[in-house]
Image: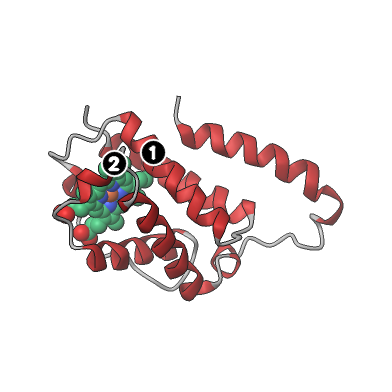
Amino acid sequence: MSIFRNAIVRRAAVAIVLSLPVSAAFAHDNYYQQFGQKPGIKAVVNRFVGYVLADHRISHYFATTDIPNLKAALTDQFCQEEGGPCKYTGPSMADVHQGLGVNETAFNALVADLIKGMDRQHIPLDAQNNLLAKLAPMESQIVTR
Ligand code: HEM
């Protein structure tokens, strides 16, 4: 069971309960704006990567990683997935993660760090859910064992 599905179902339920009366007034899907455009996405990525590097479950995967490059790539990727004017131009998710030996436990830990970063940055839940839903299909290219 993917943590994405759990997180999305839980958050969608909360969003439905809390937002029904005002949903019409705020009915737009400009997730990039909800993230605070590029500066907001950069801030989320900074927090997210900070949590990952401090997370003893997964920090060792990043021991030799060029962190500024990783942050820039994630910023472009998230910006693109949220409908912003950016393009991720790096290698495919399969190529990047090939040979890292990422398992589902590690994957779930990283997603939890991403959710924590978005929460701490006060990103609205529907924008969070949209990003998680875009990233979810990548799991099969990243988890190799
Ligand atoms: C949906 C989940 C994930 C996404 C969207 C994602 C995305 C990315 C991106 C965009 C890069 C940079 C590619 C580039 O160099 O241009 C990257 C690199 C990397 N990712 Fe992930 N990743 C995910 C999950 C994971 C997980 C679960 C791990 C390990 C626990 C992991 C470990 C790494 C490592 C170690 C690198 C750097 C590889 C290197 O130094 O060459 N990733 N990832």
User: Which image quadrant is residue 22 in?
Assistant: bottom right
Check disc 1: other Cα within 10 Å, few if <14, some if 14-19, many if 20+: some
User: Which image quadrant is residue 65 in?
Assistant: bottom left
Is 87 placed above or below 113 here?
below
Numbered badge on residue 93: none
* Circle 1: element type: helix
The answer to the question of whether label 1 and label 2 lie on touching residues, with beta carbons closer than 8 A, is yes
Residue annotated with mark 2:
58
* Mark earlier in primary sequence (1, 2): 2
Name the one closer to the observer, 57 or 102: 57
- Classify residue 70 as left or right of residue 63: right
Residue 37 image position (x, y, % from top left)? 52, 73
Mark 1 C-beta to ligand 1 under 8 Å:
yes
- Classify residue 143 as left or right of residue 112: left
Residue 104 image position (x, y, % from top left)? 33, 30
Residue 102 in sight from this viewpoint: yes
Quarter of the picture containing the N terminus is top left
Question: How many numbered marks appear?
Answer: 2
Is 116 placed above or below 9 here?
below
Check disc 2: other Cα within 10 Å, few if <14, some if 14-19, many if 20+: some
Q: Amino acid at mark 2?
A: Ile
Label 1 to label 2: alpha-carbon separation: 7 Å
Residue annotated with mark 1:
109
Q: Residue furthest top?
A: 1
**Which residue: 34% across, 45% down?**
55
**Which residue: 87% across, 52% down?**
21
Mark 2 C-beta to ligand 1 under 8 Å:
yes
**Which residue: 43% across, 73% down?**
85
Q: Amino acid at mark 1?
A: Ala
Residue 7 image position (x, y, % from top left)? 55, 37
Residue 90 in sight from this viewpoint: no
